[in-house]
Image: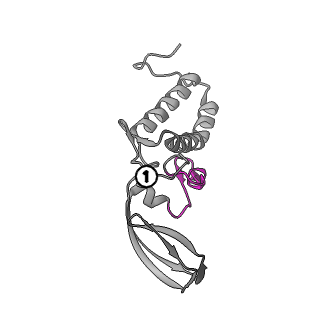
Amino acid sequence: MPRPRNEFPNFEGKGDALRQMFRALPRVVGNMAVNFYKDRFRRQGWHDNSFSRWPDRKRPEKGARRAVLVKSGRLRRSIRIINTTFNSVTVGTDVPYAKIHNEGGQVNVSQSVKRHDRKAHRRRVRGREQRVKAHSVKAHTRSFSATIPQRKYMGRSRLLTKRIVMHINKQIDNLS
């Protein structure tokens, strides 16, 4: 039976169990955070006070209907506990493009294109089909910029904090 909130628990003789609980707590909280962040990919949005759905892709892929922010699954799989101490836990990722997807912003990219040969093909221009001859493309560099919308999947969340507090209270109730 849960104790009333105005009553203090009786911890006499439970010092070892309490120390063990607090020793394991950073790892447990870290795992809760990792699972919460990975669940954002399944639910396709961020949940703080309320749920906010991620914006869709500008150009959806033909045929395949895959989730937003998932192509190979590398970003989702890379979320893990980075460091734990006796009173803190750090959860993060080492994927280079993680920050821009989580925070959004402007990206300026310079891309090197190697020399290559193109095959003959046909293309439509203004409703008419044109034949394009085979030709060589010289090596070159091209630059472009893109605006990446924010699709938050990591950070502070009131829902996650509430779940952690409920878990800690439940653990303390089990000790008393």
Amino acid at pointer 1? Arg
Number of marks in picture: 1
User: Residue shown at 46%/38% (left/top)?
Assistant: 160
Label 1 secondary element: loop
Asked whether 96 falls inside the magenta stretch, the response is: yes
Q: Which residues are magenta?
A: 69-97
Residue placed most toward the observer, 158 or 52: 52
> Residue 132, how many percent across, how many down?
52, 76
Q: Residue furthest top?
A: 1
Asked whether 111 falls inside the magenta stretch, the response is: no
Q: Residues within 10 Å of mark 1 (few under 14, many from 20)?
A: few
Name the quadrant containing residue 124.
bottom left
Q: Is residue 100 left or right of residue 28?
A: left
User: Residue shown at 56%/41% (left/top)?
Assistant: 35
User: Residue shown at 48%/82% (left/top)?
Assistant: 141
Residue placed most toward the observer, 8 or 96: 96
Residue placed most toward the observer, 57 or 85: 57
Residue labelled with disc 1: 57
> Residue 49, how many percent across, how many down?
35, 36
User: Residue shown at 60%/35% (left/top)?
Assistant: 21
**Can you say which quadrant of the picture contains the C terminus?**
top right
Name the quadrant containing residue 143.
bottom left
> Residue 3, how many percent across, how many down?
48, 16
Q: Is residue 125 left or right of residue 28?
A: left
